[in-house]
Image (cartoon, rainbow, N blue to C red):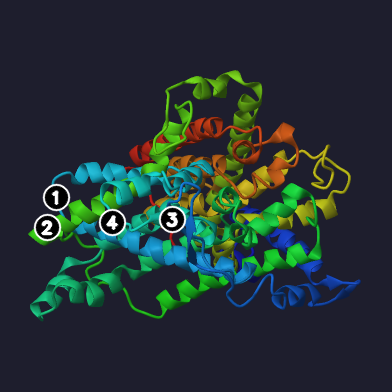
Amino acid sequence: MKVSKWSERLFGTPLFDPVVTTSFLFPLLYLVAFLIIPVLAMLAVAFEYNGHFSFHWFTSILTSEYYISWPTGEFSRLVTLPNGEQIYYVQGVDFGVILNSIIVSLSVMILTTILGTVFAFVMARYDFPGKNIVRILLFVPLLVTPFVNVFIVKKMFLPNGLINWLFYDILHIFPHRIVIDGLVGVIVAQAMTYYPIVYLNAYASFINIDPTLEEQAENLGSRGFHLFRTVTFPLALPGIAAGATLVGIFSLEDLAAPIVFQGNPLARKLMSFQIYSAFTSGFNVGSPQLAALALIMLTIAILMFLGIRKYVSLRQYAMLSKGGRWKPRVAKPKGWQAVLIYLVVLPMLLISIFPQVGVVLLAFSESWVGTWPEGFTTAHIQSIITQPDIERVIMNSIMYSTAAIIVILLLSLTASYASSRFKKSQLGPILDSLSTIPIAVPGIVIAMSYFFFFAKVFPDTPLDPTNLLGFNPAMVLVLAYSIRRLPFAARSISAGIQQVHVSLEEAALNLGAGRWKALTGILIPLILLNLLGGAMLSFVYCMSETSVGITLGSINPDYYPITARMVELMTSAVGSANLAAALGVFLMTVQIIAIVLANVITKQRYSFIGLT
């Protein structure tokens, strides 16, 4: 066969191979068609004014005091209730929509980094009575229940809520009762939701630190916090930074907290809520100014993503003995350390898991007026299988997620195989970047770009989101889910492929097997556990997908996914928070089953995707 230089440059093989070519082209074309082109379609709308290329819409946003302004309002104030009692009402300061979003994102990053790093360090370095129980409790905040857990957080900080009952009525630490709302409420709710992402990444980093490096520092006189600051923390920084960056991006795109706290005007002055409210109101949804706002959000998210990667890459974190066998440094805590663990860290953990506990309590309660829910009933849980509209949204989500998982597996397998096995290819780095970058693209931006793209390409068809009564979002949601959740499965499969030595496939090829036979007969069986683990966790993320589900998925009620129905139950006048909590319990059950099976199948603890 004739050697082809272009084949070697593009695909890393001197001879044309249809399996290799397909492995490169299928994910590349898919990502270009359903990620790059929709974003470019939105780009074209944002940069057009009166039929010409213009920065008009960006200029109008960046010069408007509604979007960027000097700080206005009071961060907190003392309010007198009708009964004469005074409370501190904390809401934050208004800097305009764009600066508010950045400040909230950075604040959540800082809080989650502190919480996640503290929990991870305690769990990685200390052996104390009850550690296994704490390990299980740290699993609880991983259970995502869109909207309902934020609703519980809001109730925790009401005048008669859990926090004031504990710190004002019982411990008498607060001089007044405290109520959080607005931007502060959004920050607290997001921090309590997202800190496990930092915890998982930080814990893995602490466990993987070579203990001899810290021992050498101790021999040179370094102790305590100085040792942590100069040796331990810098070595764990890549994992911590990866988790913090993900938190920043997730905070930027989050809709649950702004929707629950939208009664306060400040909570509505966030980029994600501005775009979402355009969908729900139908006003201004297709405007160029909204497209420009979505692109500003995308730019901020990508800069955060690339900035952390660049910062981490500037420093050296490699350890000479990496790959050898060692036991992590685990010690019994000293007296004062034990006091901190049991009187500070453990209470913080118990408070942080109350939102998930509260979701279960709300689902089985008749009402929740004071500090605790009242009455017990299974009616809300039974509604999941007795109410046709609830059954329909569950089946819709299952169908959308299942179809998306099939696509995700095909994309992940081909992309990971091509970029991992054919490193001389010029397309390899591009494919690897494209399969990772969706993690940095906010879901609300994908929703907006799909709105413009499908309205332009498929006008007056069931795929046109402006055709409100005739729009069928099934295909659009499957495409969006497959793009949004691709990096999670791709990372799992790529790790599996890298653990299988290439010589096993080469031996099969030398014995006469074709590339397809070597792939299906050798490689796929060896990475099957990674495939199944990645598929199950991606399925969970698809089921609980919020940004796309409550925007594009909420246009036609006949095709609602679970999250679209949940937000309707939480916000409509005839809705039911208890029924939304019952759907939250269903999602939590699905997550528990999937994560447990993934851990059993892959024989490892599963973490969120990192950046390194």
Sequence order check, earlier mark of 1 and 2: 1
Q: Quadrant of residue 468?
A: top right
The reply to whether residue 355 is visible in this rendering is yes
- Residue linked to disc 3: 87
| Eye-nearest disc, 4 or 1 | 4
Image quarter hosting the C terminus: bottom left
Sequence order check, earlier mark of 2 and 4: 4
| Eye-nearest disc, 2 or 4 | 4
- Residue linked to disc 1: 128
Give the farthest residue toward the top: 386
| Eye-nearest disc, 3 or 2 | 3
Label 2 SS? loop
- Residue linked to disc 2: 333
Where 561 sits versus 347, above or below? above
Label 3 SS? strand
Q: Quadrant of residue 473?
A: top right
Towards the viewer: 340 or 52: 340
Sequence order check, earlier mark of 3 and 2: 3
| Eye-nearest disc, 1 or 3 | 3
Name the residue type under label 4.
Ile
